[in-house]
Protein backbone atom coordinates (compact mmCIF):
# COMPACT_ATOMS: atom_id res chain seq x y z
CA UNK A 1 0.00 0.00 0.00
CA UNK A 2 1.20 3.48 -0.88
CA UNK A 3 0.56 5.36 2.35
CA UNK A 4 0.51 8.90 0.97
CA UNK A 5 -2.94 10.47 1.56
CA UNK A 6 -4.42 7.30 3.06
CA UNK A 7 -6.68 7.84 6.07
CA UNK A 8 -6.16 5.93 9.30
CA UNK A 9 -8.26 5.67 12.45
CA UNK A 10 -6.09 4.93 15.49
CA UNK A 11 -7.79 4.08 18.78
CA UNK A 12 -6.06 4.72 22.09
CA UNK A 13 -4.01 7.44 20.40
CA UNK A 14 -3.65 9.81 23.36
CA UNK A 15 -0.51 8.09 24.67
CA UNK A 16 1.88 5.15 24.30
CA UNK A 17 1.80 3.00 21.20
CA UNK A 18 -1.18 4.83 19.72
CA UNK A 19 0.56 8.18 19.96
CA UNK A 20 3.75 6.76 18.46
CA UNK A 21 1.83 5.17 15.59
CA UNK A 22 -0.01 8.43 14.87
CA UNK A 23 3.24 10.37 14.60
CA UNK A 24 4.94 7.73 12.45
CA UNK A 25 2.03 7.36 10.03
CA UNK A 26 1.58 11.11 9.74
CA UNK A 27 5.26 11.41 8.84
CA UNK A 28 4.56 8.96 6.01
CA UNK A 29 1.81 11.18 4.63
CA UNK A 30 -1.12 9.36 6.22
CA UNK A 31 -4.03 11.51 7.37
CA UNK A 32 -4.52 10.28 10.92
CA UNK A 33 -7.73 10.20 12.91
CA UNK A 34 -6.51 10.07 16.50
CA UNK A 35 -9.17 8.66 18.80
CA UNK A 36 -9.41 8.32 22.58
CA UNK A 37 -11.45 9.53 25.53
CA UNK A 38 -8.98 12.28 26.52
CA UNK A 39 -9.73 15.00 23.99
CA UNK A 40 -7.30 17.48 25.58
CA UNK A 41 -4.35 15.15 24.99
CA UNK A 42 -5.55 14.41 21.47
CA UNK A 43 -5.70 18.12 20.67
CA UNK A 44 -2.11 18.52 21.84
CA UNK A 45 -1.03 15.62 19.63
CA UNK A 46 -3.03 17.03 16.72
CA UNK A 47 -1.21 20.35 17.05
CA UNK A 48 2.17 18.59 17.24
CA UNK A 49 1.50 16.59 14.08
CA UNK A 50 0.18 19.55 12.08
CA UNK A 51 3.12 21.71 13.20
CA UNK A 52 5.40 19.19 11.49
CA UNK A 53 3.39 19.30 8.25
CA UNK A 54 1.17 16.29 8.86
CA UNK A 55 -2.61 16.02 8.89
CA UNK A 56 -4.44 14.92 12.02
CA UNK A 57 -7.97 15.07 13.33
CA UNK A 58 -8.80 14.51 17.00
CA UNK A 59 -11.81 12.26 17.62
CA UNK A 60 -13.27 11.88 21.09
CA UNK A 61 -14.16 8.20 21.30
CA UNK A 62 -14.89 5.62 23.97
CA UNK A 63 -14.34 2.24 22.30
CA UNK A 64 -16.53 0.51 24.91
CA UNK A 65 -19.53 2.54 23.74
CA UNK A 66 -20.87 1.59 20.27
CA UNK A 67 -22.66 4.93 19.91
CA UNK A 68 -19.47 6.84 20.70
CA UNK A 69 -17.57 4.78 18.15
CA UNK A 70 -20.19 5.31 15.45
CA UNK A 71 -20.18 9.05 16.12
CA UNK A 72 -16.37 9.20 15.95
CA UNK A 73 -16.17 7.18 12.73
CA UNK A 74 -18.80 9.39 11.14
CA UNK A 75 -16.91 12.55 12.16
CA UNK A 76 -13.65 11.20 10.74
CA UNK A 77 -15.31 10.27 7.44
CA UNK A 78 -16.88 13.70 7.16
CA UNK A 79 -13.51 15.35 7.84
CA UNK A 80 -11.24 13.29 5.57
CA UNK A 81 -13.84 11.68 3.27
CA UNK A 82 -12.87 8.04 3.78
CA UNK A 83 -11.07 5.51 5.98
CA UNK A 84 -8.41 3.15 4.61
CA UNK A 85 -6.68 1.86 7.73
CA UNK A 86 -7.98 0.88 11.17
CA UNK A 87 -5.50 0.48 14.01
CA UNK A 88 -7.23 -1.18 16.97
CA UNK A 89 -4.79 -0.14 19.65
CA UNK A 90 -6.84 0.80 22.73
CA UNK A 91 -6.18 -1.58 25.62
CA UNK A 92 -5.64 -1.85 29.37
CA UNK A 93 -3.57 -4.26 31.47
CA UNK A 94 -4.39 -4.49 35.18
CA UNK A 95 -2.64 -7.43 36.87
CA UNK A 96 -3.63 -9.45 39.93
CA UNK A 97 -4.18 -13.05 40.97
CA UNK A 98 -7.62 -14.48 40.22
CA UNK A 99 -8.35 -15.15 43.90
CA UNK A 100 -8.09 -11.44 44.71
CA UNK A 101 -11.38 -11.08 42.83
CA UNK A 102 -10.74 -7.74 41.16
CA UNK A 103 -13.88 -8.30 39.12
CA UNK A 104 -14.24 -4.66 38.07
CA UNK A 105 -10.82 -4.92 36.41
CA UNK A 106 -11.86 -8.15 34.69
CA UNK A 107 -14.93 -6.44 33.27
CA UNK A 108 -12.96 -3.38 32.18
CA UNK A 109 -10.47 -5.56 30.27
CA UNK A 110 -13.26 -7.41 28.49
CA UNK A 111 -14.97 -4.12 27.65
CA UNK A 112 -11.86 -2.37 26.30
CA UNK A 113 -9.65 -5.16 24.97
CA UNK A 114 -12.39 -7.31 23.42
CA UNK A 115 -15.58 -5.32 22.98
CA UNK A 116 -13.57 -2.26 21.98
CA UNK A 117 -12.11 -4.06 18.98
CA UNK A 118 -15.50 -5.47 18.06
CA UNK A 119 -17.13 -2.04 18.23
CA UNK A 120 -14.54 -0.25 16.10
CA UNK A 121 -14.32 -3.10 13.60
CA UNK A 122 -18.10 -3.18 13.23
CA UNK A 123 -18.12 0.56 12.51
CA UNK A 124 -15.21 0.73 10.08
CA UNK A 125 -15.34 -2.61 8.24
CA UNK A 126 -18.46 -1.77 6.18
CA UNK A 127 -16.55 1.21 4.73
CA UNK A 128 -13.61 -0.98 3.76
CA UNK A 129 -15.94 -3.57 2.24
CA UNK A 130 -17.68 -0.89 0.17
CA UNK A 131 -14.40 0.41 -1.26
CA UNK A 132 -13.05 -3.16 -1.64
CA UNK A 133 -9.73 -2.30 0.01
CA UNK A 134 -8.20 -1.51 3.35
CA UNK A 135 -6.04 -2.76 6.18
CA UNK A 136 -6.98 -3.58 9.78
CA UNK A 137 -4.23 -3.82 12.38
CA UNK A 138 -5.08 -5.28 15.79
CA UNK A 139 -2.80 -4.92 18.80
CA UNK A 140 -2.45 -8.26 20.52
CA UNK A 141 0.55 -9.03 22.77
CA UNK A 142 3.09 -11.64 23.76
CA UNK A 143 0.24 -12.45 26.18
CA UNK A 144 -1.76 -13.47 23.13
CA UNK A 145 0.67 -16.37 22.63
CA UNK A 146 1.99 -17.13 26.11
CA UNK A 147 0.47 -17.23 29.59
CA UNK A 148 1.60 -15.28 32.66
CA UNK A 149 0.48 -15.48 36.29
CA UNK A 150 -1.45 -12.41 37.34
CA UNK A 151 -2.61 -11.73 33.80
CA UNK A 152 -5.37 -14.32 33.39
CA UNK A 153 -8.02 -12.03 31.92
CA UNK A 154 -5.50 -9.91 30.03
CA UNK A 155 -4.00 -13.03 28.42
CA UNK A 156 -7.49 -14.27 27.56
CA UNK A 157 -8.34 -10.95 25.94
CA UNK A 158 -5.17 -10.90 23.87
CA UNK A 159 -5.63 -14.53 22.82
CA UNK A 160 -9.04 -13.38 21.60
CA UNK A 161 -7.44 -10.59 19.56
CA UNK A 162 -5.01 -13.00 17.91
CA UNK A 163 -7.76 -15.51 17.08
CA UNK A 164 -10.24 -12.88 15.90
CA UNK A 165 -7.59 -11.30 13.68
CA UNK A 166 -6.66 -14.49 11.87
CA UNK A 167 -10.26 -15.59 11.35
CA UNK A 168 -11.07 -12.11 10.06
CA UNK A 169 -8.18 -12.44 7.62
CA UNK A 170 -9.58 -15.79 6.42
CA UNK A 171 -13.10 -14.43 5.98
CA UNK A 172 -12.56 -10.98 4.49
CA UNK A 173 -9.09 -11.05 2.95
CA UNK A 174 -9.76 -12.65 -0.41
CA UNK A 175 -13.47 -11.85 -0.45
CA UNK A 176 -13.18 -8.10 0.14
CA UNK A 177 -9.50 -7.36 -0.59
CA UNK A 178 -8.86 -6.30 3.01
CA UNK A 179 -5.64 -7.16 4.80
CA UNK A 180 -5.54 -7.99 8.51
CA UNK A 181 -2.47 -7.92 10.75
CA UNK A 182 -2.05 -8.91 14.39
CA UNK A 183 0.85 -7.15 16.13
CA UNK A 184 2.12 -9.03 19.19
CA UNK A 185 4.66 -6.99 21.17
CA UNK A 186 6.67 -7.96 24.19
CA UNK A 187 7.69 -5.37 26.78
CA UNK A 188 7.00 -1.84 25.54
CA UNK A 189 7.67 1.45 27.34
CA UNK A 190 4.11 2.74 27.79
CA UNK A 191 1.84 3.73 30.67
CA UNK A 192 0.16 0.28 30.83
CA UNK A 193 1.93 -0.62 34.05
CA UNK A 194 0.49 2.46 35.76
CA UNK A 195 -2.92 0.76 35.60
CA UNK A 196 -1.84 -2.09 37.90
CA UNK A 197 -3.40 -1.74 41.35
CA UNK A 198 -1.83 -4.86 42.89
CA UNK A 199 1.32 -3.63 44.67
CA UNK A 200 3.37 -6.82 44.20
CA UNK A 201 2.63 -7.16 40.50
CA UNK A 202 3.21 -3.48 39.87
CA UNK A 203 6.62 -3.66 41.51
CA UNK A 204 7.40 -6.81 39.53
CA UNK A 205 6.43 -5.23 36.22
CA UNK A 206 8.36 -2.06 36.96
CA UNK A 207 11.36 -4.17 37.89
CA UNK A 208 11.48 -5.50 34.35
CA UNK A 209 12.79 -2.11 33.22
CA UNK A 210 16.04 -2.88 35.03
CA UNK A 211 16.39 -6.24 33.27
CA UNK A 212 15.98 -5.22 29.65
CA UNK A 213 15.70 -2.36 27.21
CA UNK A 214 12.01 -2.05 26.48
CA UNK A 215 10.68 -1.54 22.99
CA UNK A 216 9.51 1.98 22.21
CA UNK A 217 6.13 2.92 20.71
CA UNK A 218 8.09 3.92 17.61
CA UNK A 219 9.43 0.36 17.30
CA UNK A 220 5.86 -0.90 17.14
CA UNK A 221 4.91 1.83 14.68
CA UNK A 222 7.72 0.81 12.34
CA UNK A 223 6.49 -2.78 12.37
CA UNK A 224 3.03 -1.56 11.34
CA UNK A 225 4.50 0.49 8.52
CA UNK A 226 6.30 -2.63 7.29
CA UNK A 227 2.98 -4.49 7.15
CA UNK A 228 1.11 -1.56 5.60
CA UNK A 229 3.70 -0.97 2.88
CA UNK A 230 3.92 -4.61 1.84
CA UNK A 231 2.91 -5.27 -1.78
CA UNK A 232 -0.85 -5.34 -2.26
CA UNK A 233 -0.92 -9.12 -2.71
CA UNK A 234 0.93 -9.69 0.59
CA UNK A 235 -0.80 -9.95 3.98
CA UNK A 236 1.59 -9.84 6.92
CA UNK A 237 -0.82 -11.69 9.17
CA UNK A 238 1.24 -11.72 12.41
CA UNK A 239 4.25 -9.87 13.76
CA UNK A 240 5.76 -11.07 17.05
CA UNK A 241 8.12 -8.36 18.35
CA UNK A 242 10.32 -8.64 21.44
CA UNK A 243 13.24 -6.79 23.00
CA UNK A 244 16.37 -8.71 22.08
CA UNK A 245 17.02 -9.48 25.77
CA UNK A 246 13.48 -10.63 26.59
CA UNK A 247 13.91 -14.38 26.97
CA UNK A 248 10.33 -15.26 27.99
Image: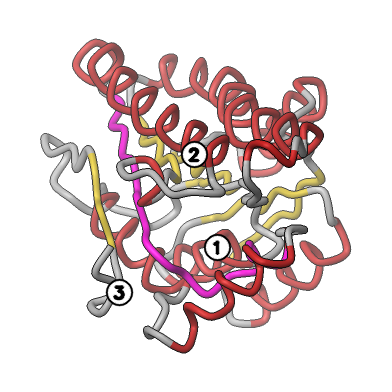
Q: Earlier in the sequence, mark 2 or mark 3?
A: 2
Residue 161 x %, y %: 43, 32
Query: Label 3: few (<14), some or many (≥20) within 10 Å?
Result: some
CA–CA distance in space, label 3 to label 1: 22 Å
User: Does the stretch in magenta take in 213?
Assistant: no
Query: Label 2: few (<14), some or many (≥20) within 10 Å?
Result: many
Quadrant the C terminus occupies: bottom left
Q: State the extent of the magenta-drawn residues as a range.
A: 178-194
Q: Describe the element under mark 3 as helix, strand or loop.
A: loop
Q: Nearer the viewer, residue 224 or 109?
A: 109
- The label number, if any, that marks residue 22 in the structure image: 1
Residue drawn 47% across the image and 89% down it: 210
Name the outermost residue toward the bottom.
210
Residue drawn 40% across the image and 35% down it: 136
Scheme of colours in the image: secondary structure
Q: Circle 2 is placed at which residue position?
A: 86
Residue 70 x %, y %: 73, 24
Q: Describe the element under mark 1 as helix, strand or loop.
A: helix
Amino acid sequence: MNLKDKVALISGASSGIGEGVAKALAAKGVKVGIAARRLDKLKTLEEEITAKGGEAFAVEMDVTNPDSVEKGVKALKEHFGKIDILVNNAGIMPAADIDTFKTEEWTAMVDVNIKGILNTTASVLPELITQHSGHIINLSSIAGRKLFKGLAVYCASKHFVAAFSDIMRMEIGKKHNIRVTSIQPGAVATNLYEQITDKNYKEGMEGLREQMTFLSPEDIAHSMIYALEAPDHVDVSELFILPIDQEW
